[in-house]
Image: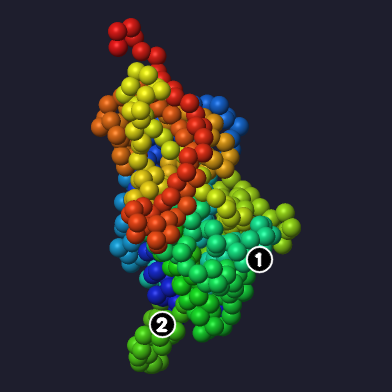
Amino acid sequence: MWFLEAPEYGFARQVLQRGTAALFFIAFLSSFNQFPALLGEHGLLPVPRWVERSQGYGRPSLFRWRYSDRLLRLVCVTGMALALLLVAGLPQLGPPWVPLLMFLALWLLYMSVVNVGQTFYGFGWEMLLLELGFTVAFLGSEQVPPPRTILLLLLWLLFRLEFGAGMIKIRGGSEWRDLTALYYHHETQPMPGPLSRQAHLLPKPLHRMEVLGNHFAQLVVPFFLFAPQPVAAVAAGIVIFTQLWLVGSGNFAWLNWSAIVLAFAAVSDPVLRAVFGIPDPAVSPAPAGVPQSPVWWTAVVLAATVLLLVLAYRPLRNLLSSGQLMNASFNRWQLGNTYGAFGTVTKHRVEVVVEGTLDADPDGEGWREYGFKGKPGDPRRLPRQWAPYHLRLDWLMWFLPLRTIHEPWFYAFLHKLLDADPATLRLLRLDPFDGGRPRWVRARTFLYRFASRAEFRENGERWVRLELYEAIPPLSLPRSPGK
């Protein structure tokens, strides 16, 4: 059935498959490095204990039957190996069922991780990657043309991501409606990047233009992704441009890169050739042996299309609802989700600073600050670019002052510092005790703001911070007599 095939989207398929595989590689790498310390057998929120307490939890995961740190690392290594093969394009050279099975394996393996990840995996980009991986599995291989219905479903996924985020903002805080949201966002976002301060210091009229541009990109442009070419490709270009701006001004794991990859579903080969001045291939009568999709593959694609169309009902209804949900999944397989972020913008940045001391008396002056890899701490330190890699502990630290600092995982973290747990310390940038055990630890809160250009020239500090209060007073572990 020729109308189901889109041979003019060959390059788009390459970007969609290889880009998605690259994001899976990063996701598995992040889990390999951080999951055991955060959620492993001896982690802050151990998976075995959580599974035992949540027997009614219905989402599928290999680890519901058995968890060990060794098995987790095996799953991650397997996922990284499969992802690298797909990035290299090797499975795509074979029959279409080969990349299909490999992407479905990535989806199932990573879903096993996400579904036991608790609060450390409670981010929208986790379910986005799962849905993206499942959908691109049905793009086939070089032996068949790209399926048009799957490309349209990928655009539907991008539409939900962009339009959903836009509607969350319009229905959310007044700062999005009065165009002042960017007065604050660059400074108060979860994990600023190296350019965030410069973006924050731009004149306020430019910030208002940023908000207007965001509304246009998220509320208007997504509809044109479904238009004929070259309009669809122009819309995709606007999405890519705005997402690259977000990449440069913050750290949002692989969220923005997922949107960039998805946007290529609207970019056809003729448009790319026209943009880059590549001559059209010579037109010749099609030989009788031109590969066409076998009947079995067409049936598989149509079955997947029907499934995803059925699952589209609830997210569509959610988009139209005044009680719109943000980053919600409506089924245990995390397909047909709803997305969105930053419905309201935090006006002030409060940071939790963790300190330890070797002094026997906690009232002494010997307190030293632990350094985190991504979250602000040292006022002189330039924020780093980490995305698309995801620092899960640092992101959760941002949420503490917004919710409650008395989270079970945070108290577990403080006790790990008192034990000088090597796995926990590897999550940090700076251990002020070089592997030694402090006598006491505590948590203080500070109000942070970006330094003006004049303040930075005066003292070299990129942040100005003001102490607020002691959130958790000094804690210690019981010690044996004489120690």
Q: Is residue 342 left or right of residue 95?
A: right
The C terminus sits in image quarter: top left
Residue 242 tag number? none
Select label 1 or label 2 by which is in front: 1
> For numbered disc 2, what is the local secondary structure?
helix
Q: Earlier in the sequence, mark 1 or mark 2?
A: 1
Q: Residue 346 location, x and y as percent?
A: 57, 52
* In front of the other: 152 or 176: 176
Count the marks.
2
CA neighbours of label 2 inside 10 A, class few (<14), some (14 to 19), many (20+)? some
Alpha carbon separation for disc pair 1 and 2: 38 Å
> For numbered disc 1, what is the local secondary structure?
loop
Q: Residue 65 location, x and y as percent?
A: 47, 32
Q: Residue, x 58% and y 40% (percent of image)?
A: 403
Identify the residue position indicated by label 2 in the image: 272
Q: Residue, x 41% and y 47% (percent of image)?
A: 376
Q: Height in image: 121 above or below 440?
A: below
Identify the residue position indicated by label 1 in the image: 178
Q: Residue, x 53% and y 77% (percent of image)?
A: 235
Q: Amino acid at mark 2?
A: Leu
Q: Amino acid at mark 1?
A: Asp
Q: Is residue 260 left or right of residue 383?
A: right
Q: Residue 199 location, x and y as percent?
A: 45, 65
* In front of the other: 180 or 67: 180
Q: Are marks 1 and 2 in contact (CB under 8 Å)?
A: no
Q: Height in image: 393 above or below 483?
A: below
